[in-house]
């Protein structure tokens, strides 16, 4: 029978359940997760393996022979012990080691292990393969108990082998499983597998026996039943004709308070990676690569999905994307000025933009996927309205086009401006689209640019900055301002922000300051004095 005890300061609840090998005892026992550990005892060519690490058992190690009471050995073969079976480990591997035990008649630890990183409220399963080493009926049956306990107190869950590990002829390994839920506030447990014996399992007149083997101790999470499949296709292997519109659905039990999900993908059914954003109960693969892909679903209680120790795994679905010809891809650029443009699929559009156009094969699969960048005729650009100094010239260049027509009828790609006025150009591009642009150019006598010789930065909103309006037409001009002792207090390229009489945000004292202005157009440098009044 199984005894599960939940301990607190004020309550003690005992729940009795019957133990049957491989039976399930908790609600969340539908699907397993990745085992947290599996003790296989290793493998080797020598009959006897070295002892277990210190602290894993309280039985005495025997390096050769048949273990007596209170002794154990780790072997890959049993032979020559009176009334014993001759056998290998439970998998039949001739080199696989397993533990053989001569049981004591009082509780004594056979194997113990501490496990950390568990999630309160999650269900876990301990499974152990065991066999009665004796082949003769009527001897003492080994009685084994499994305790699950916090590191610092008594067990909260336990079960045992009932009337003992039975004699089987021929020899037969049996798997015992035990499921339990971690209480609130607990994340570490001690697993203690121990032997015990009392007269209720064998009368005092019975002697001999009480020997058993133990192999493949496995511990890991279990959770609600989780089964996945592809809609419309039975089984775990699916062929996808066009590698699209495949939906993998799931059926998940509801033993958790709230299920949370994460889909995973693999190319070899061995190495798995999370699919970003795939956190619902169904998933639609979106892949254009031919080949075989594997999918599975992780399920956990809300808040526990990130821990591999606290989640369970569905069955695996294999999708074969090899029965279609992968589509070809091309990128196109075109111009449109009026009317419609016909995409490769035959669809017509009449506005600019980027279009993803798909041409289907006779089987309905994508065969040609085109990215079409459809643009209007690039417009000519004569720049912003601007000022030139009297006697200065400038050249207008609208860009590269097929034909040009300027305001005076000339057809050169560029136009030389020698005086102020309105200038325009009409162009055609390689698609025959017409576009035009206009610019206003003014000329001034740069030697007489009005520059104020005083301003009053006192915050009254009147004449608070050294304002020189015409400098806005000379975006590359440079302005430097110095104290009478030659210390620079201001510099600027262009004059979009007039000087406010400060240095590093702090007001400069009233007085006379010296300026140097270079219009950067081969005209004389402008210099002089400006006075700050406060």
Image (cartoon, helix red, strand yellow):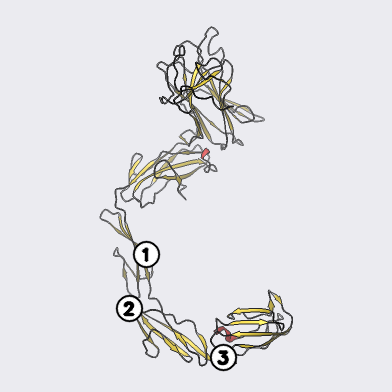
Q: Are marks 2 and 3 in contact (CB under 8 Å)?
A: no
Let me know if residue 212 appears in the view.
Answer: yes
Disc number for residue 355: 1
As drawn, 16 above or below 306: above
Nearest the camera: 471 or 371?
A: 471
**Residue shown at 63% from the left, 85% from the top:** 516
Q: Is residue 101 above or below residue 344?
A: above
Q: Is residue 281 visible?
A: no
**Marked residue nearer the N-terminal end (1 or 2):** 1
The Cα atoms of the two marked residues, 2 and 3, are separated by 42 Å
Residue 468 placement: quadrant: bottom right
Query: Where is residue 346 drawn, in percent x and y?
Result: 29, 65
**Is there a contact, CB below 8 Å, between mark 3 and mark 1?**
no
Secondary structure under tag 3 reads: helix
Q: Which mark is residue 15?
A: none
Local secondary structure at mark 2:
loop
Of the two numbered discs 3 and 1 on the same chain, state the one appearing first in sequence. Answer: 1
| Label 3 sits on residue | 446
Name of the residue lying farthest toward the left: 362
Of circles 2 and 3, the one toward us is 3
* Side (left or right) of 276 relative to 466: left
Q: Which residue is mark 2?
A: 432
> The C terminus lies in which quarter of the figure?
bottom right
Query: Disc 2 or 3, which lies upstream in sequence?
Result: 2
Density class for disc 2 (Cα within 10 Å; few <14, some 14-19, many ≥20) is: some
């Amino acid at each position: 029978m199984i005894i599960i005890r939940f301990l607190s300061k004020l309550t003690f609840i005992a729940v009795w359940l019957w133990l049957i090998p491989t039976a399930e005892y908790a609600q969340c026992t539908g699907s397993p997760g990745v085992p947290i550990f599996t003790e296989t005892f290793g493998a080797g060519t020598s009959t006897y393996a070295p002892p277990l690490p210190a602290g894993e058992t309280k039985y005495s190690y025997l390096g050769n022979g048949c273990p007596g009471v209170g002794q154990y050995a780790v072997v890959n073969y049993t032979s020559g012990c009176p009334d014993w079976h001759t056998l290998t480990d439970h998998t039949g591997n001739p080199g696989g080691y397993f533990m053989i035990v001569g049981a004591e008649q009082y509780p004594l630890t056979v194997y113990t292990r501490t496990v950390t990183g568990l999630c309160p409220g999650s269900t876990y399963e301990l499974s152990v393969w065991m066999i009665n080493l004796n082949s003769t009926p009527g001897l003492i049956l080994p009685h084994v108990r499994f305790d699950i306990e916090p590191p610092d107190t008594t067990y909260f869950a336990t079960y045992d082998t009932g009337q003992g590990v039975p004699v089987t002829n021929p020899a037969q390994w049996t798997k015992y499983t035990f499921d339990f839920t971690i209480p609130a506030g607990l994340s570490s447990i001690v697993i203690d597998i121990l032997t015990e014996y009392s007269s209720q399992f064998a009368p005092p007149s019975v002697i001999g026996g009480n020997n058993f083997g133990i192999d493949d101790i496995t511990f890991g999470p279990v959770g609600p039943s989780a089964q996945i499949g592809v809609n419309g296709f039975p089984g775990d292997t699916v062929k996808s004709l066009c590698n699209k519109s495949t939906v993998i659905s799931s059926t998940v039990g509801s033993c958790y308070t709230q299920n949370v999900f994460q889909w995973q993908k693999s190319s070899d059914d061995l190495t798995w990676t999370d699919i970003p954003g795939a956190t619902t109960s169904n998933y639609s693969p979106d892949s254009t690569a031919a080949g075989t892909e594997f999918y599975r679903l992780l399920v956990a209680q809300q808040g526990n999905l990130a821990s591999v120790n606290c989640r369970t795994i569905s069955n695996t679905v294999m999708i074969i994307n090899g029965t279609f010809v992968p589509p070809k891809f091309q990128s196109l650029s075109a111009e449109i000025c009026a009317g419609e443009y016909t995409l490769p699929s035959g669809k017509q559009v009449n506005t600019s933009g980027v279009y993803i156009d798909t041409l289907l094969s006779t089987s309905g699969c994508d065969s040609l996927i085109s990215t079409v960048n459809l643009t209007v005729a690039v417009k000519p650009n004569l720049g912003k309205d601007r000022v030139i100094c009297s006697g200065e010239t400038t050249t207008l260049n609208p860009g590269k086009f097929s034909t040009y027509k300027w305001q005076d009828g000339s057809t050169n790609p560029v136009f030389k401006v020698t005086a102020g006025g309105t200038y325009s150009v009409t162009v055609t591009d390689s698609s025959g689209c017409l576009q035009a642009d206009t610019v206003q150019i003014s000329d001034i006598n740069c030697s007489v640019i009005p520059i104020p010789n005083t301003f009053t930065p006192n915050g009254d909103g009147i004449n608070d900055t050294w304002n020189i309006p015409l400098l806005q037409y000379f975006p590359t001009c440079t302005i430097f301002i110095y104290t009478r002792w030659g210390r620079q207090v201001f510099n600027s390229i262009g004059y979009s922000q007039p000087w406010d009489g400060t240095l590093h945000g702090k007001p400069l004292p009233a007085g006379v300051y010296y300026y140097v202005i270079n219009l950067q157009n081969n005209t004389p440098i402008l210099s002089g004095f400006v006075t700050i009044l406060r």
